Image: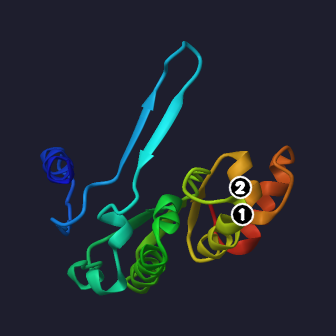
Amino acid sequence: AGQRAVRDLRADGVEVVALIDSAAPTGLMVKDSPVRGTSRVQYYRAGSAASRLTVGDLPVIDFDDVAVFHITGITLALSEDARSAAFELVHRARGSGARVSFDVNYRSKLWSHSDASPWYRHMASLVDIVFGGDEELAMVVDVPADDHDALIEAVQALGPGE
């Protein structure tokens, strides 16, 4: 599955830097709609190649020509090593002059709100752009989700301009 994803992305013109871990499967999320208007999500990420990502895997990535680097909150949830690698990638991207965007992308099946929140807050403080729904942003800044203006102000106070 991982090799197919790399092939399909390259076919669409995306430059892909991919490490192959033949001892671990590609993580997978399956979403279906058993009844109209509902959805069910199953994750198959335990022991995935992405969960085994470490800072030692990162030298293959060259940020010299990268204008924007995007990271997802899912990577932060996969393992402590993957989380450390994600933060290191952000520091390297920023150091090369790239803009960094972060999609909170909270998944309660991967980790708890209380475990995720401080890591999301820290990541949001390092990036230029933050993506998230009101509930996700409330986790980042501990502001009520129904106070949209306060959410935006609080996220921007962490440092991102967008």
Disc marking residue 154: none
Q: What residue sits 15% from the left and 51% below the top?
A: 10
Q: Identify the image quadrant of residue 153.
A: bottom right
Q: Residues within 10 Å of mark 1 (few under 14, many from 20)?
A: many
| Of the pair 152 and 3, the residue shown nearer to us | 3
- Kindly identify the residue that appears in the image at 47 percent across and 81 percent down: 84
Q: What element carries label 1?
A: helix
* Percent of width and height locating residue 140: 71, 63
Q: Name the residue under label 2.
A: 137
Question: Residue 37: percent from the left, percent from the top?
Answer: 59, 17
Spatial distance from mark 1 to mark 2, Cα to Cα?
5 Å
Amino acid type indicated by mark 2: Leu
- Indicate whether 9 appears above or below 20: above
Location of the C terminus (image quadrant): bottom right
Vertical side of 69 occupied by 149: above or below: above
**Residue 85, percent from left and from top:** 41, 79
**In the drawing, does residue 145 fall left or right of residue 135?**
right
Report x, y in % for residue 102: 53, 62
Residue at image point 29% right, 64% down:
49
Label 2 secondary element:
helix
Kindly identify which numbered label has been placed on residue 140. Answer: 1
Amino acid type assigned to the residue bearing label 1 in the image: Val
Q: State the image quarter where residue 127 is shown.
A: bottom right
Q: Residues within 10 Å of mark 2 (few under 14, many from 20)?
A: many
Q: Look at the numbered discs 1 and 2 and tell me whether their residues touch, using CB distance below 8 Å.
A: yes
Q: Is residue 120 left or right of residue 71?
A: right
Q: In the image shown, does 41 or 96 lie closer to the viewer?
A: 41
